[in-house]
Image (cartoon, helix red, strand yellow):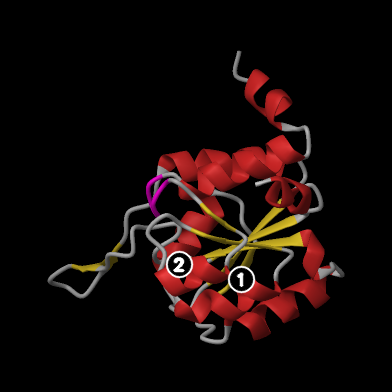
């Protein structure tokens, strides 16, 4: 765990997959073809705390969805890469666009398409219900499942490692 804390101290960007990370991975379709997903409010507040502390959130996802655009806008996430099957290529583009090193990036994913990005990032993370092979290669695995507060757990870990968690929480006193 100490190496995870050390890696988290350098993070300036948290990159998240969507299905299985920000959601529980379930896809619901209405009779009219509309897509419905559930997002955790816990994760949303964690992202806000992280953003307010100067750490940028970003999304890389293999699917494309208007619903995700709406949720990202609510969370003020302006770095969204949708329809990107090769997560590592998208991560490299994002890194280059922001002028960051991989050591300054945390990536969280849950399944095999995320594996190369998890391995390349300075802090590679998977969720509690992530695929076992992904967990084997990640630096850290959350206790919470995707869509159930895992991102909040990650945000608080990064803030704590950087000595910013108490200030983030105390604003609610």
Could you say where residue 112 lies in the image, as x and y percent from the top left?
46, 79
Q: CA distance from mark 2 to mark 1?
A: 9 Å
Q: Is residue 32 left or right of residue 168?
A: left
Secondary structure beneath label 1: helix
- The answer to which of 6 and 89 lies nearer the viewer is 6
Q: Which residues are magenta?
A: 144-148
Q: Quadrant of residue 50?
A: top right
Q: Image point 70% across, 39% down: which residue? A: 159
Describe residue 158's horizontal placement relative to residue 163 as left or right: left
Residue 136 position within the rendered picture, expressed as x and y whole percent measured from the top left: 51, 69
Front residue of 90 and 137: 137
The question of residue 146 being in magenta is answered with yes
Mark closer to the chain start, 2 or 1: 2
Residue 118 numbered tag: 1
Q: Observer-nearest residue: 2 or 37?
A: 2
Q: For the residue labelled by badge 2, is the local secondary structure a helix, a strand or a loop?
A: loop
Q: Residue at x 71, y 45 (%)?
A: 2
């Amino acid at each position: 765990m100490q190496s995870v804390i050390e890696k988290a101290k350098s993070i300036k960007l948290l990159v998240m997959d969507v299905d299985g990370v920000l959601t529980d991975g379930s896809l619901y379709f209405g009779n009219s073809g509309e897509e419905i997903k559930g997002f955790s409010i816990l994760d949303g507040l964690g992202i806000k705390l992280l953003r307010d502390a100067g750490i940028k959130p970003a999304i890389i996802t293999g699917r494309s969805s208007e619903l995700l655009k709406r949720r990202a806008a609510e969370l003020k996430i302006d770095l969204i890469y949708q329809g990107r099957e090769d997560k590592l290529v998208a991560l490299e583009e994002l890194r280059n666009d922001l002028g960051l090193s991989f050591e300054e990036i945390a990536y969280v994913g849950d399944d095999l398409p995320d594996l190369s990005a998890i391995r390349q990032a300075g802090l590679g993370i998977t969720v509690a219900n992530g695929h076992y092979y992904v967990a084997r290669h990640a630096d850290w695995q959350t206790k919470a499942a995707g869509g159930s507060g895992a991102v909040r757990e990650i945000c608080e870990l990064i803030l704590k490692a950087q000595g910013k968690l108490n200030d983030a929480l105390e604003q609610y006193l």
